[in-house]
Image (cartoon, grey):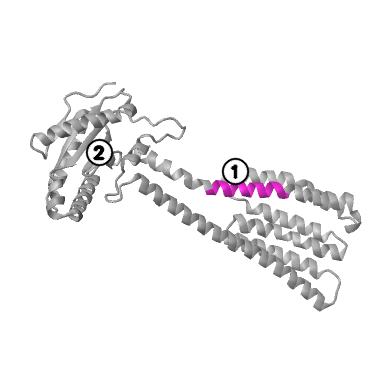
Amino acid sequence: MSRAGRARAAEAAPDATSGRASLRASELFTVLCAPGLLLLALGAVFVAPQLLHPGTAAVVLLGGLLAPPVAALAVLRQRRTRRPQGWWSVWATCVLSVLTLSISDPAFRQTAVMSLVVGPLYAAMFTSTRAVLGHLALALAAGSAIVAAVPGDGLERGLRVVAVQMVLVLSVAGLFVLRRRLDATVEQLTAARDRADHLAGHDPLTGLLNRRGLRAALTATSADGTAAGLGPTGAVLLDVDHFKSVNDTLGHDVGDAVLARVAAVLTATVRPTDLLARIGGEEFLLIATTSDLAEVADLGERLRAAVAADGGYPPVTVSAGVAFCPPGTAVPCLVEELQTRADELLYRAKSTGRNRVCVQPHPLRS
């Protein structure tokens, strides 16, 4: 991966935090529901068997005993796929439906039917809109059928069905709307954080890296957490010639436009693996990975020529100093020395006529 790619990966890493938190919450929900189903089954079979229809105890107990291993399977699959397992909540809804249908006491069955909201609530918190609607439809169908079977006249049964449906729909819809609002808030906060991070590491006028952004890109870590080695590295320090006179005669707005234009020309000329930053008023620093001093010198000359040939108004030129570290040098600790040496060479280019590139005669040694 290139240095620029490592820097972008380091900046993007925090964006996965909210997704991991949601997956952990989904796993916690699953792990907590599993023992709840088991306790309900054990309580119905061994504590209050009189509440169950004859012959249903074995089915209820089997559903409860299967809850922990099925939940464990759901968590394992979620960790493998990095997605919440909607099938688990469908299975839990079916188990709760069987448990509720096994209850013989009409009053207790009407109370137990509200446990069917667990599946749709899971979907509303962690899955897609389509999954939420599917879970809710299943819970509504099961709940309506269960309470409609409770003895009573037609009006009483109808009211019970409507009451169950209202509780299910309002509970799930309320949680789903709350989740959407929270998701929107998180997206806004993430976007604001990304903008702040970008502004902290980039020059607002040119969009290039600033000193802080360049330092972060140079110290970006690789995937295994070790420091990213830069390899043989060259530095090209460029300065816009006679920039003060541009500001003094044409104004700072024109000066800003000149800097933005020069930055655009430099950006179009450098290679994707190079790091380009604005480090001062009219100074630009390029850090390039290459194994040849002549290649760095050629890059500096191409940058100088590109600015001189730009043709914008007012026409400007740049002077440049080029320094280089050979293979085997501990480059990360020599970046500042590279810049210092390039600055000396830049001053030499300025003092010998400007619009030229001065290159160090020999590469730096560690």
Q: Residue furthest front?
A: 248
Decide: is 308 above or below 114.
Answer: above
- Apparent side of residue 278 relative to residue 353 in the rendered image (left or right): right
**Of residues 189 and 83, the one drawn nearer to the viewer in this rendering:** 189
Instruction: Give the quarter of the figure containing the N terminus.
Output: top left
- Apparent side of residue 215 relative to residue 172 in the rendered image (left or right): left
- The mark closer to the camera, 2 or 1, is 2
**Residue at disc 2, secondary structure:** strand
- Seen at 38% across and 40% down, the residue is 7
Instruction: Give the quarter of the figure containing the C terminus.
Output: top left
Quadrant assignment, res 103: bottom right
The magenta segment is 18-33
Return the x and y of residue 256 as percentages of the image width and height.
Answer: 21, 52
Task: Give me the disc on residue 285.
Answer: 2
- Seen at 65% across and 53% down, the residue is 87
Return the x and y of residue 337 as percentages of the image width and height.
Answer: 27, 28
Separation of residues labelled 2 and 1 (CA atoms): 44 Å
Task: Give me the disc on residue 79.
Answer: 1
Residue 270 seen in this snapshot: yes
Quadrant assignment, res 210: top left
Asked if the stretch drawn in magenta spans residue 31, the answer is yes
Q: Residue furthest top?
A: 366
Amino acid bearing label 1: Arg
Q: Residues within 10 Å of mark 2 (few under 14, many from 20)?
A: many
